[in-house]
């Protein structure tokens, strides 16, 4: 039976976590990183961000290198929201990312821009 994935964003995030954890077992947990992003494939995330030209569109919107679009103190204020946003963009842009892809992309944004602290 498939795990029930209810449509609320935080529940979706929990489902991706479950999926992410399955592929991430062989990596050591990094306690400095929120649980949502642990074990993510950062190289994969970097490649997906390049391939899908995320920055180009963001640059058109905010200028610079596009990173001003990422606002850790705004709407995207916690790891689950970041995961949900990447999933939303993926759907909107019809990227057809797998949950582990979404986690990888979000983990790169976490590392480079959002830097959320792990839950205590
Ligand atoms: C077609 C244009 C476009 C593309 C391509 C695009 N984005 Fe965005 N993205 C936007 C716009 C516009 C916003 C800002 C929406 C707003 O005003 O809050 C945004 C916002 C975001 C945010 C939220 C920023 C914040 O802190 O509020 C994230 C995360 C994000 N994009 C991730 C991505 C990723 C990852 C990709 C590539 C897989 C991507 N985007 C590709 C247009 C785009």
Image: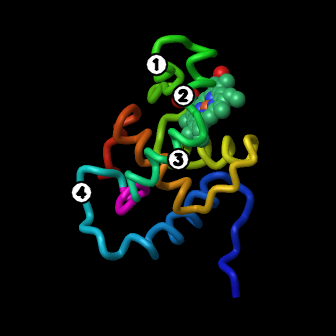
Alpha carbon separation for disc pair 1 and 3: 17 Å
- Name the foreground residue: 37 vs 47: 47
Alpha carbon separation for disc pair 4 and 3: 25 Å
Q: Give whichever of discs 4 and 2 has the lower sequence position.
A: 4
Residue 52, above or below 69: below
Q: Are marks 1 and 2 in contact (CB under 8 Å)?
A: yes
- Quick check: is the Cβ at mark 2 less than 8 Å away from ligand 1? no
Write the residue at 26% across / 64% down. Answer: 29
Residue 65, above or below 100: above
Write the residue at 55% across / 48% down. Answer: 83
- Quick check: is the Cβ at mark 3 less than 8 Å away from ligand 1? yes
Of marks 4 and 2, the one in the foreground: 2
Identify the residue position indicated by label 1 in the image: 65
Q: Position of residue 86 (x, y in %)?
A: 59, 44
Q: Residues within 10 Å of mark 1 (few under 14, many from 20)?
A: few
Taking the image in four quarters, ligand 1 sits in the one at top right
Alpha carbon separation for disc pair 4 and 2: 29 Å
Q: Residues within 10 Å of mark 4 (few under 14, many from 20)?
A: few
Identify the residue position indicated by label 4 in the image: 31
Q: Is residue 55 magenta?
A: no
Q: Secondary structure at mark 1?
A: loop
Of marks 1 and 4, the one in the foreground: 1
Identify the residue position indicated by label 3 in the image: 48
On the rendered image, what quadrant is the N terminus found in?
bottom right
Q: State which region is magenta.
A: 35-40
Identify the residue position indicated by label 2 in the image: 55
């Amino acid at each position: 039976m498939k795990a029930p994935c209810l449509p609320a964003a935080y529940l979706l995030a929990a489902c991706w976590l479950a999926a992410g954890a399955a592929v991430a077992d062989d990596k050591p947990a990094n306690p400095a990183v929120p649980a949502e992003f642990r074990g993510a494939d950062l190289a994969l995330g970097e490649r997906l961000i390049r391939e899908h030209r995320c920055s180009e569109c963001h640059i058109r919107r905010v200028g610079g290198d596009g990173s001003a679009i990422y606002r850790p103190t705004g709407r995207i204020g916690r790891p689950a929201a970041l995961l949900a946003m990447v999933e939303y963009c993926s759907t909107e842009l019809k990227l057809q990312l797998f949950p582990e892809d979404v986690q990888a992309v979000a983990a790169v944004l976490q590392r480079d821009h959002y830097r959320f602290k792990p839950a205590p």
